[in-house]
Every structure is written in structure tokens, then in C-alpha cells.
Image: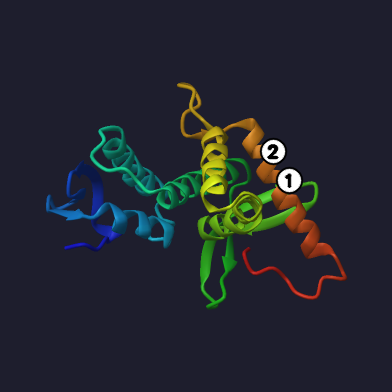
Amino acid sequence: MNTLNPQEQIEFNYSKDGVIVITESGNTQTVSYKSAITALDNGMYDGDLPLGFLLIGSIADSWTSKIYTPSTEQRVILFRWIVSSLFVQAQIAHNGTRLIENSQGEKELAAMYISDKGGITIYPASERMLLATHIESVALQKYGKQQGSEMIINMYFEFIDRSTENGGKLTEKALKELAFLHDELIDAFNTPESNSTPVIH
């Protein structure tokens, strides 16, 4: 089996064949690293970010152990997921969540970004899109795919606080730079001359 169902998973391990998925009932399955990374990128773990971080941890362990080496594109995906998810978690901790109505007319909880510019709801998927379109695209256009991708990976790596006491958080510099990006987005929303509302938030 090479599919993932977050509702049934409780932990992960790694092997030469892929990520070992262990379910609450004690069953196991092995999922290819490519499929696991695709699942993260497609939002399969957006509703359970801690579980997604556990999956990232297993992929990272396999990488450290030299069992599996992600491609440059996959590294961008992994670091983008980490940075966007850490930002969402930081905003939930700081501003809480709101019950809002989604495009399907259903009620759901959404994280909030709030500053003196205003406030907007944010989601892991929209944060990944924001990073890809407003940060990554600039680097790729200016420096090309290979060099641009390496610069993106290095930047995201530096965004993550790796100190023992603050592990699992973004650096203050990262939070400020991402806040600036979101403030620009709010300004765009509030500009009367804007002909259309961005759809990423």
C-alpha cells in the first residue's frame, strides 16, 4: 500500500523502502518517501500539523542516516512546509483562532494573523502558496532553478530556530519578514484601486 490516511496514524518510522506508518490499531504499512512528501505538499496533514511534523521527522531521520536523500525540489517542499506550519502555529499561539464560514458554506476554525494593519485568516495551504508565489518565484526568476532553489532552502533553514530551548519555532527575523509579507497583503486588500481580491487567504 502506498497511500496515507492521517486519521489512522499515530507514529512513523523509516526504512530503506520508505516511511513506515504505524496505526492506532498496531497495523503498519510502508509508504514511499516521494508519496509521503507529496502528501505533505498536498495538504494531507494540514488538519493535524503535529502529526505532519512527526512525518517530517522520520523523513529527516532517513536523510541523516543516508538512507534517502530528497531531491532539491523535495527539499524546497519540506522546508516550505515546515516554515509555513511553524508560522501558522505561532499565529495561533499569539492570536488564537476564529470560527469562520468557508467557501463551501461550512463553519471551520482558522488561524488569525493580526497586526496594526488589520487581520486576516491564514491556513497552512495558503501560507505555502504565499511563500511559493511571493518569495520562491522571485529567487527562481532571478537566479535560475538550481541556484535559486539552493538559496530558498538556505533561507528557510535560517528561518528555523534550532536552539535547544526554542526548537520548533521560527526565528524573530523570520517572524518579522513573514509579518511584513502579510502586512503587504493586507494593504493590497485595503487598496481601493485593487481590481481583484487575492485568493490565497
Residue type, numbered disc 1: Phe
Taking the image as shown, residue 1 lies to the left or right of residue 98, namely left
Q: Is residue 100 above or below residue 164?
A: below
| Residue at the spot of label 2 | 176
| Residue drawn where x is 24% and y is 55% of the image | 32
Compare residues 93 and 172 and report the one nearer the observer.
172
Compare residues 19 and 34 and report the one nearer the observer.
34
Q: Is residue 20 visible?
A: no
Q: For the residue labelled by badge 1, is the local secondary structure a helix, a strand or a loop?
A: helix
Which quadrant of the rendered structure holds the C terminus?
bottom right
On the image, the x and y values in percent for residue 129 come to 57, 59
Q: For the residue labelled by badge 2, is the local secondary structure a helix, a strand or a loop?
A: helix
On the image, the x and y values in percent for residue 99 come to 57, 62
| Residue drawn where x is 29% and y is 41% of the image | 58
Q: Is residue 42 above or below residue 25?
A: below
Taking the image as shown, residue 93 lies to the left or right of residue 61, namely right
Taking the image as shown, residue 66 lies to the left or right of residue 80, namely left
| Residue drawn where x is 30% and y is 56% of the image | 34
Residue type, numbered disc 2: Lys
Q: Dividing the picture into quarters, in which one does residue 130 lie?
A: bottom right
| Residue drawn where x is 35% and y is 48% of the image | 51
